[in-house]
Amino acid sequence: MAAMNLGYLLYRSAAAYPDHPAIIHGDAVLTYRECNERVNRVGSALRRLGLEPGDRVAIFSPNRPEILEVLFATWKAGLAAVPMNFRLHRDEVRYILNHSEAKVLVYAGVYQDDIDRITGDLTATRIAVCLDGPGENGRNDALTVLAYDELLKQGDNAEWVEPVEGDDLAWLFYTSGTTGRPKGAMLTHRILLLAALNTCADIYPFGHGDIGLHAAPLSHGSGLYSLPLIAKGGTNVIFPASRFDPETVFALIEKHRITVLPFMAPTMVKRLIESEARTRYDLRSLQCIIYGGAPMYVEDLTAGLKAFGPVFAQVYGQGECPMTITGLGRDEHNLHQPERLASAGTARMGVQVCIQDAEGNRLPPGRIGEIAARSELVMKGYWHNPEATSEAIVNGWLRTGDVGYMDEHGYLYILDRTKDMIISGGNNIYPREVEEVLLCHPAVQEVCVFGVPDPEWGEAVKAVVVLRPGHEAAEEELIAFCRDHLASYKKPRSVDFLEELPKNAYGKVLKRELRARYWEGNARLV
């Protein structure tokens, strides 16, 4: 069935509000007319490079305006975007490029050395576009390297939006994988359009007068929340640094009269709450802080409501159902109902949520089981991974891997995970990835990795290691070893050493038993 191309959202706002600011970054301002013209040029240039509808374009960069330009150019041209976390290790970037079969890579110049080191291993990527212009070492035999400014010059400003079907791929959202390899959740034009509409209906009524500050990565939740802002002709202010800083956030809120923080991880919100700099700035324009990606403690929410007022809105979802499973609205963040603050809210519009047992049977209110969701918002499946798709979507229900219960009023409470995934600072980390790296260290005989409580990050990565007889290794050495082979945020924060790991009669490591020692006394295990 034919559907509206997401690129039309920008076209519509450019027609209605041509002189209104679309993107602000530092002192640079792009109006909707200028932004739309640049997007048209990039989109037409990509097609002239030989890309066909459905081909993938990967993006590897910290937050900057060009990310939004490339997203919309990709969609207008009928292509699919593959945004990547800018903190990924080059080996992870190489895997995603090859697995997605991305024809083009758009990257920030700061990663030039990393790109040079993987180009010889790329199987499908033949064109690279450097946002800062290719340096002398940026040209090699494996890739045709263009500067972004060159790409703009090669395109034209003819207004055109490629027709798409509702199930056509728009965004390939890579999530950490239980096997140690990321999986690409296929998000279509229909899914992302419905997600934007749902957000306006359930979470925050984005409007033309809204000014949003993107302080979280545009490659993830914040990028998804650019859609309702652009659809409504609002302004996107791009956080100017790759490292989060509360005082910079406050300064930008005051300077630009920010009305909404479109998406923030709980650890970011906690830092805003705890920062003394908050009292030095005028924050009265702020109407909504949308947070999600990890559980948030009631104590932190209570402090946040006292500091900022009733501006918080929670979203619960995952890459497989983008930020759209349940929600707790601003009016439901009530200090007089603290039990509700511990919940993840109720099912979003157009989404069914239930609790299931191991056989997929629906459980009544109060019973603990796996959280499942059914909706048109659920991913089309995992890219090139039908086995993982069939495990994740059973009888039309997305099995989230999260454990919880629903009360008699339909409020969802998340307690634990059936999967081993760790959420640290809003980032998903699977222990298998870290374990595989640690086992490559010559001193490590056995290892078990899991999440432990952390007051700042929610969870921190803990490694418990058994050393080989006659070998030695210090905690700092193993952490550094992980940092050399993984994205830095995935490395263990601490390492404990045991003479042996607890195992059952079949020799399987009792991870949950080992993990439980560190969570003793916590009502919630995530």
Image: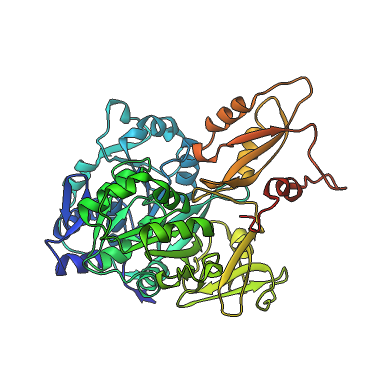
Say left or right for 393 vs 133: right
What quarter of the picture does the N terminus occupy? bottom left
Q: Position of residue 375 (x, y in %)?
A: 50, 74
Task: Give the answer, above or below, for where 145 lies relative to 222.
Answer: above
Q: Identify the residue at image location x=41%, y=60%.
A: 306
Q: Quadrant of residue 68?
A: bottom left
**Residue that lies at the very extreme toward the left in this rendered image:** 19
Name the side, left or right, on which 349 lies relative to 148. right
How many numbered marks appear?
0
Residue 335 or residue 435, whichever sits in front: 335
> At which x and y percent is residue 62?
35, 43
Task: Assign the C terminus to one quadrant of the image.
Answer: bottom right
State whether residue 55 appears in this view. no
- Compared to residue 143, the image places residue 53 above or below, namely below
Farthest right residue?
505
Q: Residue at x 73, y 46 (%)?
A: 517
Way the structure is coloured: rainbow
Horizontal relation, residue 474 to residue 95: left or right: right
Image position of 188 with respect to 483: above or below: below
Asked whether, in this view, residue 355 is left or right of residue 69, the answer is right
- Location of residue 193 by image quarter: bottom left
Q: Residue 170, position in %: x, y?
A: 38, 61
Along the line of sight, which residue is nearer the eye, 386 or 373?
A: 373
Q: Say if 459 sits above or below 231 in the image.
A: above
Q: Is residue 412 visible?
A: yes
Give coordinates of residue 123: x percent, y percent. Answer: 46, 42
